[in-house]
């Protein structure tokens, strides 16, 4: 095989590998952005329906509590460990219920828009547009609670 043919084949394989890497990276960024956008949409939907947020985290807590109970009954956890893990799960549930849905929506939208931006990613642009309304809702929550804020605090 002549050297020129070998060099051409090597160049073609290299170009194909670079193209494949670029497309896989773009797909990865797009899928991560879409996931963050969906998570932001979930939190944003809870602004209008806080009972849905409570039901979501109560359900997660009940599943975790049942899992701990099964492990304790099977002998994989001591009674003290099971009690401690149940208390931690309840504290996690309470923490998540107390978090601002608007703040969480804003941060998920900002993550989708900024951290996973790529030229082939339509979800980043959508998240960027939705981030403004989530930020406005968060600022309104803080204002209603009497918390003084300035714009530089939200960057």
Image (spheres, rainbow, N blue to C red):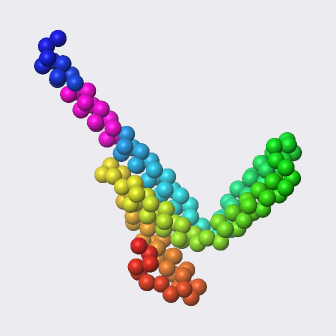
Magenta stretch: residue 124 in it?
no
- Name the residue at 43% across, 84% down: 150
Q: Tag count in the figure?
A: 0
Q: Is residue 74 left or right of residue 125?
A: right
Magenta stretch: residue 15 in it?
yes
Q: Position of residue 77 (x, y in %)?
A: 82, 47
Outermost residue, top side: 1
| Displayed quadrant of residue 20 | top left
In the rendered image, is residue 126 in sight? Answer: no
- Name the residue at 46% across, 73% down: 135
Q: Position of residue 13 (x, y in %)?
A: 26, 27
In the rendered image, is residue 39 in sight? Answer: yes
- Name the residue at 54% across, 86% down: 147
Q: Is residue 106 left or right of residue 79?
A: left
**SS majority, magenta:** helix
Q: Nearer the viewer, residue 84 or 20?
A: 84
Q: Is residue 23 above or below residue 16?
A: below
Q: Is residue 64 above or below residue 130?
A: above
| Displayed quadrant of residue 117 | bottom left
Name the quadrant of the C terminus: bottom left
Q: Is residue 1 left or right of residue 127?
A: left
Q: Nearer the viewer, residue 122 or 143?
A: 143
Q: Nearer the viewer, residue 54 or 86?
A: 86
Q: Position of residue 29 (x, y in %)?
A: 40, 49
- Name the residue at 79% across, 50% down: 68
Q: Is residue 69 above or below residue 141?
A: above
Q: Which segment is the magenta one?
A: 11-23
Q: Position of residue 38 (x, y in %)?
A: 51, 56
Name the quadrant of the N terminus: top left
């Amino acid at each position: 095989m002549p050297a020129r043919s070998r060099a051409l084949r090597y160049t073609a394989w290299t170009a194909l590998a670079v193209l494949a890497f670029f497309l896989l990276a773009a797909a990865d960024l797009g899928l991560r952005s879409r996931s963050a956008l969906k998570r932001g949409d979930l939190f944003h939907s809870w602004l209008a329906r806080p009972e849905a947020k409570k039901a979501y985290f109560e359900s997660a807590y009940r599943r975790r509590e049942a899992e701990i109970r099964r492990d304790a009954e099977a002998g994989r956890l001591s009674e003290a460990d099971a009690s401690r893990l149940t208390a931690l799960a309840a504290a996690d549930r309470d923490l998540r219920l107390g978090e601002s849905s608007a703040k969480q929506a804003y941060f998920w939208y900002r993550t989708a828009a900024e951290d996973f931006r790529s030229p082939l990613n339509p979800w980043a642009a959508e998240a960027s547009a939705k981030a403004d309304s989530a930020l406005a809702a968060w600022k309104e929550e803080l204002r209603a609670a009497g918390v003084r804020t300035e714009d530089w605090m939200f960057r």
